[in-house]
Each structure stands twice: as C-alpha cells, then as structure tokens.
Image (cartoon, rainbow, N blue to C red):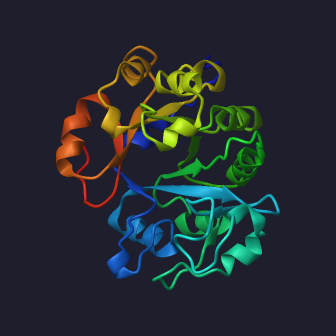
Amino acid sequence: MGEIRVPGLDWLAERPIAHRGLHDVAAGAIENSESAIRAAIDAGYAIEVDIQQTADDDAVVFHDFTLNRLTDDTGPVIDRDCATLERIRLRDSADSIMSLSALLDVVDGQVPLIIEMKSAETGDMTLAHVVAKAAETYDGPLAAMSFDPLLVDALRKAQPYFPRGFISSAYRSELAAILPFFTRLKRRYLLDITTCSPHFIAYDARALPSVAPWIARKMLDIPVISWTVTSAAEQARIAPYVDQVIFENFRPQAH
C-alpha cells in the first residue's frame, strides 16, 4: 500500500471546500454550475464537483445519473454525448451543463479543485482515464476521488502521481443497502485502501469520530477531509478528526 506518495498535498487542507461549488438556488447558482464555481472562486474557497461519464467517453460536471432532477430533460446522462449535454440548461438557472474541460478552463488553477468521479459500479473504468488525461495539461492544485475503489485504483494505474482520494461512510443508509453487506463493511472500515492506495480519505461527517479514518490519519499519515458539513457547529464538532471540510449551506471559517 502507498508505494507512491504525492508530495506537496498541503493545499488539500488550506481552505474549506465548497460542495458542488458555492451554490445558491435563490441566486440562480445551481449545484455544479459555472455560476456556483465562479462564486466559490470569488469567495476564495476550494471547490468540489461531481462528474459523470458521457456516451462518447468524455465527462460532464453533474451529480445525478439521470437528468430528471436538475433539468427539463429526462433519462440517463451516459446516454448523451458531451456536446449534447452541454446544450442542456440547468433548471432555474442561466447555466448549462459544463464539460470537464470547460470546468478546468474556468477554475484555471485559481483555487484547489477536487473532482468526484461518480460510479455506477459496473466495472467501467473510462472516467478514471478521462480524468487522468485531463490532468496531464492542467496547471493548478487538482485531485480526484470516488466511492468506487476500483475507479480510484484505475486512476492510480493511469497517473500514479496524480492526487487521488477514496470516499467512504458508515454505509448504514437505505441507499447504501444496494451494496452487499460485506462490501459495505469493507468500505466502512477503509479496507480497500490497501489496494487503491489513496493519498487522502473523504469521510462522512455524520459518522465521525470513527476508528478507521482515525487510524488512516494518525497512524498512516493519510489526510482526512469530511463531507458534507452543513453548519459551523458541525465543523467545530469534527475539527479534531479531520484536516478540512467539504461544506454547503453556510460560510465556514478555516480551522
């Protein structure tokens, strides 16, 4: 495990990380939109976004597997090519869906950027290769992470020195029940880090404190960030257990 470490990852803990950008529906800044990205940059926060694979093996900035919740279109994101998706307007917004390349052009190294690679856990590793390729020419603090350890491992193999993270939680929710019991148990206790060798962990704030991220942070020297923190009180509660927070619905102070 951890045969290659990434030096200079201090930027990961330097400033709070805006979850899906600094989104505010009332202001027309929808999650994962260009407006939310620019708002986070203007406020000086780091940014976390989600990306989905497209039909032509590219990537767009979007959280859900389907278009239904955030647009007036319907159906799976992966059924459309990147150019088609870029023309789809986000509901209650002046923004359209962004491509990964457009996202990188907008951020342009101004603040740290963390990309979550969404996975349907089908065994398709295309998204890891898309990110690895995009990272080759990007100049600025950039990392990628996923709940899927196989996707994290694919990123490790494609770009060993590119910062990669493994996302986990207690896996007790109804949604998590779609995974087999022993898979959930394995991920809860971060056992997959022995194969995907993450440079950092992103762990569910609701599950902290927890023994596995404590061991990762204190004994294995792996930074831990936490998601998704929604209040200053919650940020203060988990501060002893994490290096930084991914936040929304409030404006945090760095700790």
Q: Is residue 99 left or right of residue 7?
A: right
Residue 172 appears at what percent x and percent y?
A: 42, 33
Residue plotted at (76% across, 69% down)? 80
* Residue occupying the far right of the picture: 56
* Residue occupying the far bottom of the picture: 94
Residue plotted at (32% across, 38% down)? 206
Q: Is residue 4 above or below residue 58?
A: above
Residue plotted at (51% across, 22% down)? 185
Q: Is residue 26 above or below residue 149?
A: below
Residue 74 appears at what percent x and percent y?
A: 64, 73
Residue plotted at (55% across, 19% down)? 191
Which quadrant would the C terminus be assigned to in this image?
A: top left
Residue 12 appears at what percent x and percent y?
A: 44, 42
Report which quarter residue 13 is drawn in.
top left
Q: Is residue 165 left or right of residue 57?
A: left
Q: Is residue 24 left or right of residue 63?
A: left
* Residue occupying the far top of the picture: 219
Residue 103 appears at what percent x and percent y?
A: 59, 66
Q: Is residue 109 above or below residue 221?
A: below
Report which quarter residue 207 is drawn in.
top left
